[in-house]
């Protein structure tokens, strides 16, 4: 049996146990959709099960990386975010119904709607969607604020320089390594403006890409949390705005010196009100995110990855111009 079929079978077996644990009769549910990621770094399956009563739940099982402490921390971050937004009109995190840390799996309520990126692909005007995305993130950060702390950009600068050293030694292989190294060499130029800035600290989503944000007419929800400690809010902002720009943003509207199209940036910050659009930590971290995403593109990837890499290179040229 092919490995992917093994993963599907394992997912269904785990669903049967977790559904029963959550008080759901598994025999009344059918798998309505599934998403699989299977590469050298990650192997996981997400399945949506639809009940005869019209309700739906989602199973997630992570087979790789096999790190129980990390998985437990992810569950805790998800639950904490769910509690933080409990009862907040229009913004939510799906409730976890049952979990099995030994199997790296959990069952949660299904968040109805379309992903932020899919909606952007369906509409010409992205501004209302960007405002809603900013609103959800502002609600999440606002409910978990820890105060302010002086920002120290050297940590990310040093991290990127260590990464370049690994690339140059042959320990890490990435696409366009010479150009990547040149941009890393310039990242320190953007650090002085952010150095010591009293930035807002809050709970961190950790992977707020545009597929992990779902919008229905009256509700916006997010899931797939991966962070466990409070961090500068700029990390989540940079992750979301770069996900948007790299996947659906109008790169013809991206001027030199910008990492996100200005109209999209302004629309997002109409919804996100905890820090202003000229916050220096956000501007610095958005450039860091470009290089972080560049590093994540596999050297021999899919057509989709090749196309995204071409967009990342164009964004980097403008951002570091």
Image (cartoon, helix red, strand yellow):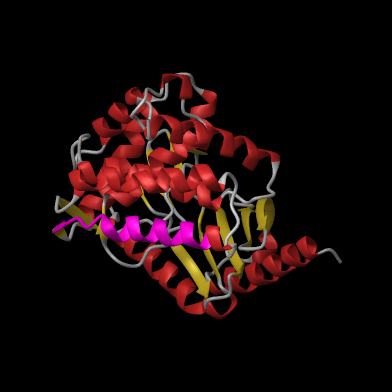
Residue 295, given in percent of the width and then of the height, sits at 52, 51
Q: Residue at x 15, y 57 (%)?
A: 150
In depth, the one of 131 and 97 nearer the eye is: 131
* Above or below for 198 versus 105: above
Q: Is residue 297 magenta?
A: no
In depth, the one of 213 and 280 nearer the eye is: 280
| Residue 212 seen by the camera | no
Q: Main secondary structure of the magenta part?
A: helix
In depth, the one of 118 and 236 nearer the eye is: 236
Residue 52, given in percent of the width and then of the height, sits at 64, 52
Q: Is residue 152 magenta?
A: yes
Residue 91, given in percent of the width and then of the height, sits at 33, 45
**Which segment is the magenta one?**
149-166
* Above or below for 83 versus 115: below
Is 78 left, or right, of 301 in this rendering? left
Is 189 left, or right, of 53 in this rendering? left
């Amino acid at each position: 049996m092919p490995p992917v079929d093994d993963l599907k079978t394992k997912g269904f077996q785990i669903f049967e146990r977790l559904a029963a644990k959550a008080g759901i009769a598994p025999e009344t549910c059918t798998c309505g959709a599934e998403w699989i990621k299977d590469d050298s770094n990650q192997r996981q399956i997400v399945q949506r099960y639809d009940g005869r009563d019209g309700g739906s739940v989602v199973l997630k099982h992570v087979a790789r990386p096999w790190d129980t402490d990390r998985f437990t921390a992810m569950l805790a971050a998800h639950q904490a975010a769910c509690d933080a937004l409990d009862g907040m009109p229009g913004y939510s995190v799906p409730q976890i119904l049952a979990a099995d840390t030994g199997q790296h799996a959990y069952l949660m309520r299904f968040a109805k709607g379309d992903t932020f990126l899919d909606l952007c692909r369906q509409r010409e005007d992205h501004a209302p969607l960007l405002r809603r995305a900013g609103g959800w993130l502002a609600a999440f950060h606002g409910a978990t604020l820890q105060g302010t702390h002086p920002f120290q950009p050297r940590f990310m600068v040093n991290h990127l320089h260590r990464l370049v050293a690994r690339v140059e030694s042959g320990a890490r292989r990435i696409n366009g390594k010479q150009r990547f190294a040149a941009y890393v060499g310039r990242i320190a130029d953007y650090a002085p403006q952010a150095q010591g800035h009293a930035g807002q600290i809050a709970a961190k989503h950790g992977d707020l890409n545009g597929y992990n944000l779902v919008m229905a007419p009256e509700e916006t929800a997010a899931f797939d949390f991966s962070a466990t400690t409070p961090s500068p809010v700029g990390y989540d902002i940079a992750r979301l705005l770069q996900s948007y720009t790299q996947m659906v943003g109008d790169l013809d509207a991206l001027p030199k010196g910008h990492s996100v199209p200005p109209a999209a940036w302004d629309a997002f910050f109409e919804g996100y009100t905890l820090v202003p659009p000229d916050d220096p930590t956000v501007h610095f971290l958005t450039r860091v995110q470009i290089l972080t995403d560049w590093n994540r593109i596999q050297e021999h990837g899919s057509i989709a990855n090749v196309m995204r890499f071409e967009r990342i290179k164009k964004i980097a040229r403008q951002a570091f111009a």
